[in-house]
């Protein structure tokens, strides 16, 4: 079963995902957390739910550090290969360990271009793991169609 947590940008989707994880404490996954410098958002880090380990995930144009390992770019965001790899490893661990639930923050424009978490998410959908995924309102119908998700639920 796939449960979608939807809403516009900055509407509390990630917080709801975290609340669901904390209420069950079973399974694993990741969430994104905004990073700020001098009061301005500079991007996001990806955090594994079970361990709290954080890896830089995205940075906006003008805040990309030297040596950044860009894997993809969308609008003004650069996504790091290390962040995407970390998310993929978390998904692989969930699958390998036959976790009861997976928590994914988030699916969107990169996946709709068959980049980002497209491959690991496709693999996750081939299991019987209960899946909770964050997806913005403006992407959810396309995500459902792309991944051929039948009977999605919305939280």
Image (spheres, rainbow, N blue to C red):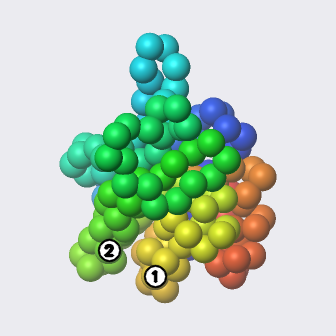
> Is residue 131 left or right of 57 when viewed as pictured?
right
Q: Toward the viewer: 104 or 89? A: 89
Asked if one can make out residue 86 in the rendered structure from this viewpoint, the answer is: yes
Percent position of residue 151, x then y: 70, 75
- Bin the neighbour count of mark 2 within 10 Å (Cα to Cα): few under 14, some 14-19, many 20 and up: some
Left or right? Give the position of 61 relative to 26: right
Residue tagged by mark 2?
Answer: 92
Tag 1 secondary structure: helix
Position above or below: 44 against 151: above
Name the residue tied to disc 1. 123
User: Could you tell me residue 141's position as x and y percent?
Assistant: 77, 65
For numbered disc 2, what is the local secondary structure? helix
Position of 141 compared to 34: left or right? right
Quadrant position of residue 153:
bottom right
Q: Are marks 2 and 1 in contact (CB under 8 Å)?
A: yes
Please give left or right for residue 134 compared with residue 119 in the image.
right
Q: As displayed, is residue 111 above or below residue 4?
A: below
């Amino acid at each position: 079963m796939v449960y979608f947590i939807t809403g516009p940008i900055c509407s509390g989707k990630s917080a709801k995902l975290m609340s669901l994880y904390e209420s069950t404490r079973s399974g694993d996954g990741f969430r994104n957390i905004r990073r700020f410098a001098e009061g301005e958002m500079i991007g996001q880090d990806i955090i594994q739910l079970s361990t709290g380990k954080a890896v830089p995930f995205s940075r906006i144009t003008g805040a990309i550090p030297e040596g950044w390992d860009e894997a993809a770019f969308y609008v003004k965001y650069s996504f790091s290969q290390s962040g995407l790899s970390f998310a993929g490893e978390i998904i692989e661990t969930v699958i390998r360990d036959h976790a009861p639930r997976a928590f994914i923050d988030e699916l969107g424009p990169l996946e709709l271009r068959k980049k980002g978490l497209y491959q690991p998410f496709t693999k996750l959908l081939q299991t019987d793991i209960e899946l909770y995924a964050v997806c913005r309102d403006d992407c959810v119908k396309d995500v459902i169609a792309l991944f051929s998700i039948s009977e999605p639920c919305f939280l």
